[in-house]
Amino acid sequence: MTIRQTRSYCRICSAHCGVILSIDDSLNRIVDVKADKDNPMSNGYVCVKGLQAEEAHHGPARLLRPLKRQPDGSFTEIGSEQALDEIAARMRAILDQDGPQAVATFKGTQGTLFATHQIQHDFLTAIGSRQFYSTNTVDQSAKMVSFERQGGWAAGPQDVSTADVLLLIGANPIISHSTMPVISPDPLRTLRKEKDRGLKLICIDPRRTETAHHADLFLQPLPGRDAGIAAALIRLILDEGWEDKEFVARHVGADRIAELRQAVEPFTTEMVELSAGLEAGQLRAAAAMFARDSKRGGAFCSTGPCMAGFSNLTQHLVDTLNIICGRFRRAGEKAVVDVGLPEMTRYAEVIAPQRSWQAHPESRIRGIGQLGIDRLASTLAEEILTPGPGQIRALIVQGGNPAVCLPDQDKIFAALEAIDLLVVVDPYMTATARFADYVLPPTMMYERADLPISVAGFPPLLPTSWTQLAQPVLKHPEGSDLIEDWYVYWALARRLGVQIAFHGMPLDMDATPTTEGLIAIRLAGAQISLDQLKEDLKTHPAGKIYDPPSAVVQPASGSNARFDVMPEDVADELTRFGQSVMARAAEAGGGFSHLLISRRLNAVMNTLGTNLSGILRNMPDNPAYMSPADLEALGLEPGDQVEIASEHGRIEAAIQPDKTMRRGIISVAHCWGGTPDKPGVNVNKLVSTSSQVEPINAMPRMSAIPVNIRRRVPAEAVS
Ligand SMILES: Nc1nc2c(c(=O)[nH]1)N[C@H]1C(S)=C(S)[C@@H](COP(=O)(O)OP(=O)(O)OC[C@H]3O[C@@H](n4cnc5c(=O)[nH]c(N)nc54)[C@H](O)[C@@H]3O)O[C@H]1N2
Ligand SMILES: Nc1nc2c(c(=O)[nH]1)N[C@H]1C(S)=C(S)[C@@H](COP(=O)(O)OP(=O)(O)OC[C@H]3O[C@@H](n4cnc5c(=O)[nH]c(N)nc54)[C@H](O)[C@@H]3O)O[C@H]1N2
Ligand code: SF4
Ligand SMILES: [Mo]
């Protein structure tokens, strides 16, 4: 037995931790995973999820051959080319009968492969469909809405390595490895290092999170009150004169600042502290630490506030905080660069508001249309279930699990059951795959070539200018019939007789492309070529941090664009928020006792991991967490089954005490449950897609959900 050691990086989440894999070539098997200390971005950090690579790749849950659903609901194996022939024939019939909008794709968090992401769009373009759905619009798409309503800064935010202060609102990077684009890999050491240098950390979270544990200032409000908190901070900063006056004069203007000040007038410190359940003096302390005592840094929202009600408004006001304090990279500073994208000169100037959604046709569902390239995920079920022209009849799901990740699980189940053709590309038999007509298992991470997460037209998503070409380090498993993720689209286009222009380049529809070939095409015009990446691997086997000339921020190009800090619709949202939420005392209200919040667990990435014994051993399901005082008040013992009921639905979970929670809230991790044989419960049964939905991106209320909790009496105890 010879064991070979090889370097690669984990791509489960955007941290992209460098790993050293021990591979037994005689078995074509990973036998050990270690952190790679030489990786200049992750510095020898790896988490429990990345360490499960052996079971993930070689364990019993992995599908190795395509499956076809039988009339009785069971699945039988089918060859991949035969499956693609049948899928193409059924798709052709749907296209002929109902036209291109009847065919849709859904991309999840594991569908971000460098080649696949691109070809999915190119396939839809080739058949003439606009129906691209993804998890983006049930995540933090408030960021895009804010960017397009308020305008953005072309050179991006300031880096954590030069920051005096970091204000994190509903972000827990120590667990999520994700406060894009400032903190991702190796989060604890990164924060500690910067704190030793003098960084001040402010956390605002209803839970004293693993990250909040390191905060210099921790505010623990009720969830869903962040827009009020941000408005009060803006009011305080402007009244004290702690804003960056020069930046504001140049990039906002006195007229717009006056509108902003007027809009935040009702949000006095006292009122917001009372309504959000904060201690007196905390808002002033936060404003002073953020704006008076610090010159550099930034305020960042993550999923917490981006999922609570008024999420677009909250993100807008948090971005406004950065604007009035001028927390952006200036000319001469270094920016992070994604060398996998074309060179893009970064100017120290405002990108004007765009409101691109106004240019898209309205959807049939509540009139809500499209955000960037995304149709809105919370409308997908209704787009499938609502008859008439444009009804979706065929769906390809790639690297996602809509049956458990999308809000209103009952409705999405009904849609997945009803759809004529469902194709799921996934290495496992997921809750979504169970509804599929065809399940096509792809190669997994260490079996294929890839590059780090990168979206054309978007700023870099990683916190450094690191990149590394990932090469396949395992062969396809023996006896398997796997496809590369992108292949589905090429193979279907070929059978449908349409031409794919991949990244603008027409593909040969007779000769199967290779993954490397597609990567090379996507790199055409980028700052680095595939050949250069291969060369660099020889000298930098753990990837390289690039420092191209385009990294230096240039002076403004002459644009006169200004930030629109308080457009009319945002002012309206702020007024509605003030009247409906902040007018309330610090309690759930409306006949509900608690507010349910989102949370992420270290051991799983959304659903990924809930099928691995190495994870389930320590985390068999997803409990409901509550403060010990709330447990006592409700007469509950740890482990008791409780019913959690929202306006929309109800779930049952085992209750666990958690002293990090403030009173009056309960939290259950998302992406569990969904099928009778899958562990845990699904919080999306509590979420509605038709009430409490934001304008523009149709983002449902997925955090700060009012709920009632009661103990479930076991059936045998009821006589
Ligand atoms: N281990 C692990 N890592 C992951 C994932 C995973 O499932 N597991 N998922 C990945 C994905 S898809 C994403 S998008 C990122 C997300 O990354 P994060 O947004 O950092 O994810 P969370 O850890 O859920 O942090 C959200 C925080 O918001 C708080 N919160 C909830 N509601 C509110 C509110 O109304 N106001 C405020 N102020 N706070 C609130 C919660 O208590 C929680 O601490 O993580 C990624 N990384
Ligand atoms: N209530 C509530 N709902 C939420 C959230 C919440 O906080 N609360 N969070 C939301 C957010 S932020 C997100 S991003 C979504 C996450 O939603 P999803 O991204 O849909 O969830 P995942 O479980 O990560 O789905 C990834 C799928 O990809 C598969 N996979 C793994 N590797 C590969 C591969 O190489 N190729 C392919 N084709 N598939 C692969 C996995 O088996 C898994 O089925 O959930 C959203 N839903
Ligand atoms: S899942 Fe863990 S090991 Fe993998 S990239 Fe994310 S943080 Fe790193
Ligand atoms: Mo996400």
Image (cartoon, rainbow, N blue to C red):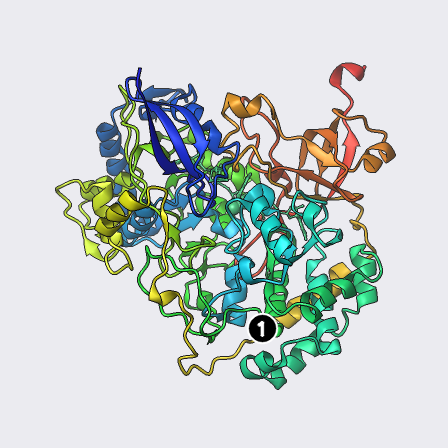
Residue behind mark 1: 326
Q: Quadrant of residue 325?
A: bottom right
Q: Is residue 551 above or below residue 495?
A: below
Q: Quadrant of residue 375?
A: bottom left
Left-right relation of 22 to 511:
right
Q: Is residue 574 above or below residue 79?
A: below
Question: In which quadrant is the N terminus drawn?
Answer: top left
Residue 289: percent from left, percent from top? 71, 64
Type of residue at label 1?
A: Gly
What's the residue at 72%, 54% (across, down)? Answer: 216
Q: Nearer the viewer, residue 637 or 554?
A: 554
Q: Nearer the viewer, residue 247 or 4?
A: 4
Left-right relation of 78 to 579:
left
Left-right relation of 313 to 353:
right
Residue 293: percent from left, percent from top? 70, 68
Q: Nearer the viewer, residue 696 or 141?
A: 141
Question: In which quadrant is the C terminus drawn?
Answer: top right
